[in-house]
Amino acid sequence: MSVSNLGSGRAGRRHIMSARMLANTVLPPVALAVLVIAAWWVAADAAHSTVFPAPLESITSLFDNLRLTEFDSSVIATLELLAESYLAAVVVGAIIGVLIGISKFWTDAVSPIIYAANSLPKIVLFPVFLIFLGIGEPSRVAFAFVSGVMPMLLIVLEGAAAVKLVHLKLAASLNMSYPALIRKIVLPSMVPSLATGARLTFGLTFVGLLVVEMFAGTGGLGYELLHNVTLVRLQDILGDVVLIVVISLVPTFFLRWLEGRARARFGA
Amino acid sequence: MAGPRALVQVRGAERHFGAIHALGPIDLDIADGEFVSVVGPSGCGKSTLLELLGGLQEADGGTLEIDGQPVDGPRQSTAIIFQESATLPWRTVTDNVAFALEARGVGRAERRRAARELVERVGLGHFGDHYPSQLSGGMRQRVALARCLSTSPTLLLADEPFGALDEQTRLLMSYELLRVVSELGCGVLFITHSIQEAVLVSDRVICLSARPGRILDEVRIDLPRPRGEHALAQPAAVAAIDRIWGTLRSEASAAMQGPET
Amino acid sequence: MSARGRGIPRYLRPMPKRVLGLPKIVWTIVVLIVLLGIVEGVAHSPAVTRFELVPIETMVRQAISLLGNGSFLKDALLHSSLMILVSFALASVVGILIALVMHAFGVVRRALNPFLSVYYSVPTFALYPIVVVIFGTGAVPIVITASAFAVISVTVKGLEGFDSVPVVIDKLGRSLELTGMKRVRTILLPAALPDVAAGLKLAFGYSIIAVLATEFILATQGLGWYISNEYDEFQIAGMYGAILIVAALALLANAGLGAVLRRFDWRRW
């Protein structure tokens, strides 16, 4: 299957996959996707419904919408807020996670509270954000941030706990100082969890943002989506959903790739 | 034990974990350049003894002295090899070997040069830029060995370093270790489960009882150095193995009856 | 002659049992009290009105009175609980079935795998508007959306569980001629139980979140709707009371399910 890289040169060399393996992993999902779209088409055709659009109609209406400045500014608004809240969630979650995670005592003391808070349906707290931060973008960004920072924190805490004892003993036997330990052993050990956290946090932050955009109703993709529900414009809705899926897929693939690299380089 | 002060002197060392009496009291000496092995059933405290000497744990009773000074923390001239190789997966072989010097503050160019030389010395010359995940278990332990060499230790503490390797690799690594140790001239405390391995490499084998570990016997290994290919077939070796097994057998079968410690 | 003679490095010492004389659990409570104290402090500060934040005692009082209110219990609490349970049940059953099919048929597995792994990165919640248009506002779109949100966590964990059957056990099974349904019953499902249990825990949490979110945005009944309605009508105290009930419900339900599922986690027996 793959070329063994024992004694074969620089690290990071890719495995060579046979064409057959490639077909085996790529074809089925592609075939499935094609099947689903085909089924959608046929169903829409057969239903002859004025309400239920065919795939092509949804895409066309999406492109039509994208030519409207109003829609575009909604999309851009969402993208900006997503970027802000996501980056903040990852950075803050990572920093606080590392600070607490270094100490098992504090990790054990604080984790139950964070786990409990994480299991709450945070959306019901959104009115509190609205009350204190107003109706505009700040409350939405803040909420999306909170949606993302808590899971990130939990993942980073787990990663900190997983630093290997034998590495700590090694450092101790070399009389390594605490700061050097953090720099040279703890942080590198945690890179895979940070990457995993970054990947998972994206989806959660985006969902959080969309949900509150749907509720708060002054702009953004979520608002557009809900707006179209009340107008029963299904092809616009489907177009919006396609757009949302595309927007989320690009960072998703990038973050997964990043995670893979992190694990390969820093994982055991 | 008479004459010049021993490199390592342990008197009445004890270790308790709460209510559990894990080790001791232990009296032990290791002379300069002497290779001492410790064998005993699981949970008898062999690793604890090693960590006490390595300054990674504090004794609850008795004294431990290296070079006439009480052990109160990790020593610069003591090097430790752990069982699962403590190689850092995100560093290359060379950078792993250089790690000990880096911890000491040696400059980058100098430590890389020293590391490269050590990597050659343990026979990993072509793998300097590889990562540990690309190496076999035996190769990773050689990286650990090279790292220990970098600080020119006077005492080497080895905690079942070949425990995770297969039989044949263990044998080869034992010879490798002997070669390196004789070049360094350091004293060695070697923990192992394998009686044969202990007899092959040591000057003296200490038999520890089940928990709390106490010394049951000390067997002098009178085999010529360097230890050759057929060392274990020598009558002196066979007699030693026999005697050690005789001492440990009852401890081992007691361990089989009870829960895993 | 030790190099620095300062003793064993701090990071290798065992975790302290107490900090400042207090054990961990006391510190957990301390942190909790501090957080509640902040809420209370803000609520009482002159800058904050009762349309923004109310003292904890008021929240609790409102919660208690809501729990005595028949229509709240029926239209909100019971309604939401029902939605959650139905979604959870649906997600669990469908999730395990999908996992079984994927485990049994390699081609299906390879077809679905990429979608499964991006499932939670893509806002599946965007499905809700679509089903609302098709099915109207009511129970059906809520259950569909919440089940869809939760189902894949069961599938992913289920697959992990089925994959975790040690190869030797599988060989043992084959040598004892345990195939097909017998294999599923005696080997596959028991082996997968701890992972499936973990998946069910996740799914339950997701069901709660999704049901409440859908009710919050677009519904005419339910706990989520109640809270958003109180907010719309400036009944802030009532809103906080309901939030408290939701928080308590979520915590108790998750803890309860966790306790039940722990009995199936043979790894911890």
Image: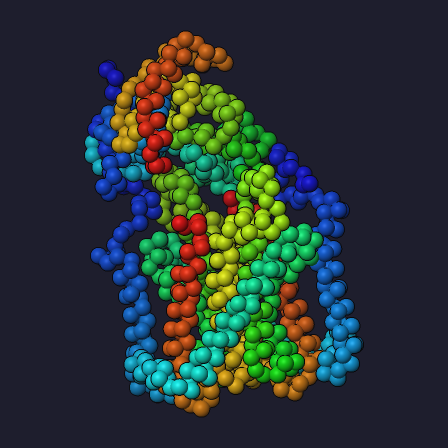
- Quadrant where the N terminus of chain A sits is top right
Q: Where residue C263 sits: x, y (%)?
A: 41, 56
Say how many tags the image has. 0
On the image, the x and y values in percent for residue B192 come to 39, 27
The reply, left or right, for residue B110 in relation to residue A236 is left
Q: Tell me: B63 left or right of B30.
A: left
Q: Position of residue B4 (x, y in %)?
A: 25, 17
Q: Quadrant of residue A236?
A: bottom right
The answer to whether residue A40 is visible is yes
On the question of residue A92 being in view, the answer is: no
* Residue A84 in the image: above or below residue B185: below
Q: Is residue B42 above or below residue A260?
A: above
In the picture as drawn, the residue positioned furthest to the bottom comes out as C233
Residues C75 and C57: in front is: C75
- Asked which quadrant contains residue B156, the reply is top left
Q: Is residue C159 above or below residue B11?
A: below
Residue C248 rendering spot, x and y as whole percentages: 38, 73
Residue B39 vs C127, above or below: the answer is: above
- Color encoding of the figure: rainbow
Q: Which residue is at the front of the view, A54 or A66?
A: A54
Displayed quadrant of residue A10: top right
In the rendered view, does B117 fall on the left or right side of B152?
A: right
Q: Residue furthest top?
A: B235
Pick the residue in front: A54 or C69. Answer: C69
Residue at position x 68%, y 84% in the image: A233
Determine the residue positioned at 52% across, 33% down.
Answer: B137
The residue depicted at 29 percent of the width and 83 percent of the height is: C44
Q: Nearer the viewer, residue B92 or C117?
A: C117
At x 50%, y 54%, the residue is C193
